[in-house]
Image: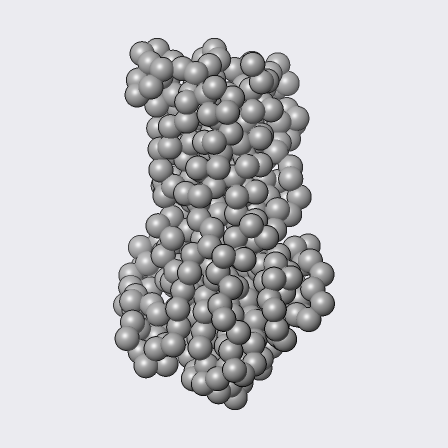
């Protein structure tokens, strides 16, 4: 049989490969318009999406794309800009303005292709009225540490923005707008992918204020005034400015899980897909996943071994320690502690964009002897978990999963292999 770590790694690679723009873009090419074709976009996968679109597009095109530092790929006719993620910077603010400039004065004969993927929220930091870039940076940092879900964070971001929540699509009117989205959010709601710059948003300023109160986020005066006055309201479903907008999901977490399941079956392992939208505190999710694995191990339920438990979604970490994060390694360390060295159970958790938290590390792997090796190295596992230091823990053990930029992003991937 294939070595367990190798099998887990191949499943992760298959999940990432299934979401590569080169495989996804061609099926969604529209008919060329009478007028101009403008390509705009933002996200960790947007440059690779632009390259794939440019390669397969039969006619002239122009446009501007913004992606994360280190995620640019060469394009011949499209300009690729880079900016910061997960905390925005001035380069992102400048790039967002370039996108607005690109869609100015369009006609009904023109076509705008919007290539949007996860990470676009921080790559398009246009502050709303009365809000500064420094305000947005501080709010973003606070949200990232708060334990808020991605949907909650993006609701706040949309209502403090001058570009999200459909505002970029409105600037394209009366041109036809086609959104090609790679989803990195549980539930695949378009308004949550990069905070929905080119789609309608049913949430409200009041919703954003409720989230801020719930998590104790300190708002600068200008940001609070924007929400309390309602001036930060987004474009709603049915808005005439969005009448010519159509949206397609070209890659999703579910597609990635199914690709990993195919690898498992080919190896004679039964895949069990637990869900593509699992959320909650990373350490709590880790405990639950370990509990399911132990049930398989002890009782052959819900399926007998050999099997692999596959799941996706986006967990959260409420930061209380001084460690390096991130959510996938926190979840995995919690799983390891709950498994307590159970035999024949191996696991991998990683972010499909190659970056877990703020580290250039996708995630990590665990084996039945992970805890024993940690104790021998003088590394109390629970102390590392309490310090939110999953990356430090797995790096010292040599069990980090490092991929480099994957140029796509369909959120977290978790696989627990029971033999």
For this rendering, which residue is in front, 389 or 149? 149
Can I make out residue 266 in this image? yes
For this rendering, which residue is in front, 80 or 212? 80
Residue 243 screen position, x and y as percent: 34, 77
Residue 25 screen position, x and y as percent: 53, 57
Residue 385 screen position, x and y as percent: 49, 31
Q: Residue at x 29, y 71 (%)?
A: 237
Q: Residue at x 60, y 24 (%)?
A: 6
Q: Is residue 312 above or below residue 364?
A: below
Q: Residue at x 56, y 24 (%)?
A: 7
Q: Quadrant of residue 26?
A: bottom right
Q: Is residue 10 above or below residue 235?
A: above
Can I make out residue 67 in this image? no
For this rendering, which residue is in front, 151 or 23? 23
Q: Is residue 287 above or below residue 131?
A: above
> Along the horizontal axis of the image, is 203 left or right of 159?
left
> Along the horizontal axis of the image, is 357 left or right of 225?
right
Residue 41 screen position, x and y as percent: 55, 66
For this rendering, which residue is in front, 130 or 78? 78
> Along the horizontal axis of the image, is 348 left or right of 258?
right
> Along the horizontal axis of the image, is 268 left or right of 51?
left
């Amino acid at each position: 049989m294939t070595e367990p770590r190798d099998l887990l790694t191949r499943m992760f690679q298959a999940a990432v490969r299934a979401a590569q723009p080169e495989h996804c873009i061609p099926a969604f090419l529209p008919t060329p318009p009478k007028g101009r074709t403008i390509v705009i976009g933002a996200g960790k996968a947007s440059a690779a999406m632009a390259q794939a679109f440019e390669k397969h597009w039969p006619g002239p095109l122009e446009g501007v794309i913004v992606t994360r530092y280190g995620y640019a790929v060469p394009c011949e006719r499209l300009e690729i800009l880079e900016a910061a993620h997960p905390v925005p910077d001035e380069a992102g603010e400048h790039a967002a303005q370039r996108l607005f400039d690109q869609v100015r004065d369009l006609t009904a004969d023109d076509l705008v292709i919007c290539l949007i993927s996860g990470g676009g929220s921080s790559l398009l930091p246009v502050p709303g009225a009365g809000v500064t870039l420094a305000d947005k940076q501080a709010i973003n940092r606070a949200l990232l540490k708060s334990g808020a879900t991605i949907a909650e964070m993006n609701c706040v971001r949309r209502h403090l923005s001058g570009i999200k929540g459909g505002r970029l699509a409105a600037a394209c009117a009366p041109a036809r707008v086609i959104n090609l989205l790679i989803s990195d959010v549980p539930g695949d709601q378009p308004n949550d992918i990069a905070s929905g710059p080119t789609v309608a948003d049913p949430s409200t300023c009041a919703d954003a204020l409720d989230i801020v109160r719930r998590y104790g986020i300190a708002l600068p005066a200008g940001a609070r005034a924007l929400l309390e006055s309602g001036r930060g309201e987004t474009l709603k479903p049915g808005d005439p400015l969005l009448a010519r907008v159509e949206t397609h999901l070209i890659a999703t977490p579910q597609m990635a899980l199914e690709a990993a399941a195919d690898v498992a079956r080919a190896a004679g392992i039964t895949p069990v897909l637990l869900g593509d939208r699992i959320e909650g505190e990373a350490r709590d999710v880790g405990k639950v996943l370990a509990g399911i694995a132990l049930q398989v191990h002890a009782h052959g339920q819900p399926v007998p071994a050999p099997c692999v438990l596959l799941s996706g979604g986006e967990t959260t970490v409420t930061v209380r320690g001084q460690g390096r994060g991130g959510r996938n390694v926190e979840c995995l360390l919690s799983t390891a502690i709950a498994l307590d060295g159970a035999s024949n159970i191996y696991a991998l958790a990683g972010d499909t964009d190659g970056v877990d938290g703020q580290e250039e590390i996708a995630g990590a792997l665990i084996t039945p002897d992970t805890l024993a090796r940690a104790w021998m190295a003088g590394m109390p596992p629970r102390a590392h978990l309490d310090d939110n230091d999953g990356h430090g823990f797995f790096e010292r053990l040599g069990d980090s999963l490092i991929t480099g930029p994957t140029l796509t992003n369909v959120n977290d991937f978790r696989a627990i292999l029971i033999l």
